[in-house]
Amino acid sequence: MSTPSQPLPRNSVKIALATAEARVWRGRGIVIDLFRFSNTITALLESGRSDVRVYPSPAMALSARRHLAGADIFSEIALGVEQYDNSPYTALYGSDPARPALSVTNSGSPAAASLLLADEILVACFANFPAVAAYCRANPMPTLIVPACLFYDMRHVEDMICARALVEELEGRDAFPAALDEIHASGRVLDFLAFRPETGKRDMELVLKKGWMKAVPRIKFKAGAGLVENLA
């Protein structure tokens, strides 16, 4: 166990196994909500959006929308307003990149908001693995990878599988093929497709492809809003 006299090595990496670990973490936190939030946030930046914001609760996102003219909300939660689904495909190809984008989700945005004490909050997915790994290796810092399923549904095992693969990626090894096999074997892809009939297939084609996005999202929370910037 680390103590004040024995700080963690700057290149140390571990995976959170409980929400409490994220809430007290003071190094770099990396959020993984593989099927939606992580890819949607990265795709919004990749599309050229310059104003992307993350909210920990629907009430906060709806309040922000009332005060931010022309903002789009991306969420899988039914908010009672005109909104986009939490869809990477829609974020990249089916929305206007000139408009502000607000994200509030069941697991990804609460996971990010839990890292309020962290020195830095990044968002990772297979699609930006190489870019995130390159940034982290160039800027070493004790790192906690936070699978967003901890904050919603532990049956969403793809987040933990992706987190383990990211540990390997940060250490210079490619665990993506094995991780992909494990995700398919879990049945989670079929679960996702069954509940996302409109864009599910196109979303999954993007989600399960490695290295095609270059954006590295960093979230900084200010007055309840997580402001997203692209470090790439």
Image: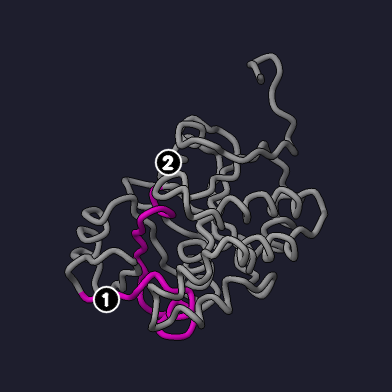
- Please give the range of residues in magenta: 82-110
The amino acid type of the residue labelled 1 equals Gly
- Residue type at mark 2 is Ser
* Residue positioned most to the right: 172
Report the residue marked by disc 2. Answer: 114
SS assignment at label 2: loop
Q: Which mark is residue 140?
A: none
**Contact (Cβ within 8 Å) of mark 1 with mark 2:** no
Q: Is residue 71 above or below residue 116?
A: below
Rendered image quadrant of residue 159: bottom right
Q: Is residue 201 above or below residue 56?
A: below
Say whether residue 83 is magenta: yes
Q: Residues within 10 Å of mark 2 (few under 14, many from 20)?
A: many
Q: Which residue in the protein does label 1 denote?
A: 70
Q: Is residue 59 left or right of residue 138?
A: left
The numbered mark, 1 or 2, whose residue comes first in the sequence reads: 1
The residue positioned 47% from the left and 59% from the top of the image is 228
Residue 69 in picture, x, y percent from top left: 24, 72
Front of the two marks 1 and 2: 2
